[in-house]
Image (cartoon, rainbow, N blue to C red):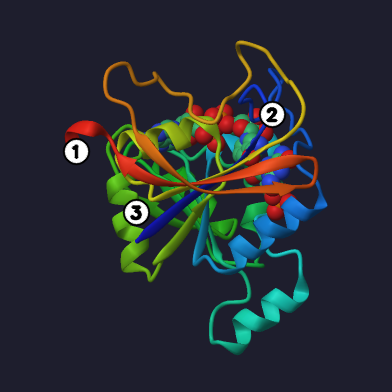
Amino acid sequence: MHVVVNAAASADGKLSTRRREQVEISGSDDFARVDRLRATSDAVLVGVGTVLADDPHLTLDDPSRRQEREARGDPRNPARVVVDSSGRTPLDARILDDEATTYVVVADETTATRKAALEDAGAEVLVAGDEQVSLPEALAKLDERGVDDLMVEGGGEIIYSLFAAGLVDELSLYVGSLVIGGRDAPTVADGPGFVESFPRLSLREVTHIDDGVLLQYDVMGRPEEQ
Ligand SMILES: NC(=O)c1ccc[n+]([C@@H]2O[C@H](COP(=O)([O-])OP(=O)(O)OC[C@H]3O[C@@H](n4cnc5c(N)ncnc54)[C@H](O)[C@@H]3O)[C@@H](O)[C@H]2O)c1
Ligand SMILES: Nc1nc(=O)c(N)c(NC[C@H](O)[C@H](O)[C@H](O)COP(=O)(O)O)[nH]1
């Protein structure tokens, strides 16, 4: 499986404000690029924090891209994936509508009642890990279901965990021309942070888009893993 993390950050590296409300960091050209990237992915993954904060839909905006996917025998939208250890995805979340297959990946501790409620609301529930979702197991289950190209759209906790597990192949980071600030505002990679061995990136391309810059990196891995 090939995993691309895509995120939009302010010049100071924040994904949103301390209130965790969505901020328009990029502009229309970058949103069109994100739509193109979604169109070439088999699934789009977010953490439940992003579902609770943004209630994203994660489908394709451009109808011609849906038609192109259908013409080549793919579902019209990529599948949607929520990493959600205890099944906190709201039953009326937009990602649970019938526009695409939605996998909610929970940990074993999630009750059977909650799993059944998520399934009734339209999710396909996958179990990976005991107390917290095990990302290697989750991605292996998605792989079994035909997900070869996975796009990750945040947020900061899930992005950190994917880097920590050595599961990221590429990072596409749009850096917008604004400062958000705030020690409690989410950044591109949160979690506990790395202290000795850091994932190393190789900068492949720099593109000026809207009023900001897109940085495209290949992930080289953490030093002891190379
Ligand atoms: N600018 C952007 O590109 C962008 C994209 C997505 C989200 N956001 C912003 O990011 C914020 C949400 O990010 P976040 O970091 O709070 O949430 P997140 O989306 O990273 O979800 C994190 C949650 O996932 C669950 N989880 C389950 N298994 C996990 C694991 N193995 N590792 C880590 N988490 C696991 C936990 O409940 C955790 O709290 C919001 O403010 C949203 O607006 C911005
Ligand atoms: N490219 C980009 N520029 C931004 O300025 C910004 N705030 C995001 N944020 C991404 C985040 O993942 C959003 O939740 C989804 O972009 C919402 O997706 P929908 O439109 O609901 O499908 N992404």
Disc number for residue 225: 1
Kind of element beneath mark 3:
helix
Q: Are marks 1 and 2 in contact (CB under 8 Å)?
A: no
Would residue 155 be found to the left or right of residue 83 on screen? right
Going from N to C along the chain, the mark reached first, 1 or 2, is 2
> What whole-number distance in Å separates the C-alpha atoms at marks 1 and 3?
19 Å
Mark 2 = which residue? 10
Direction top: furthest residue:
183
> What whole-number distance in Å separates the C-alpha atoms at marks 1 and 2?
30 Å
Residue occupying image coordinates x 32% and y 16%: 195
For the N terminus, which image quadrant? bottom left
Which label lies toward us, 1 or 3?
1
Mark 3 = which residue? 139
Q: Nearer the viewer, residue 18 or 198?
A: 198
Q: Are marks 1 and 3 in contact (CB under 8 Å)?
A: no
Q: Quadrant of ligand 2?
A: top right
Q: Is residue 52 visible?
A: no
Going from N to C along the chain, the mark reached first, 2 or 3, is 2
Going from N to C along the chain, the mark reached first, 1 or 3, is 3
Q: Nearer the viewer, residue 32 or 218?
A: 218
Q: Quadrant of residue 7?
A: top right
Kind of element beneath mark 2:
loop
Residue occupying image coordinates x 73% and y 39%: 212
For the C terminus, which image quadrant? top left
Q: Quadrant of residue 72?
A: bottom right
Residue 108: percent from the left, percent from the top?
31, 41
Residue 67: percent from the left, percent from the top?
69, 82
**Vertical position of residue 198 compared to residue 119: above or below:** above
Which label lies toward us, 2 or 3?
2
- Mark 2 CB lies closer than 8 A to ligand 1: no
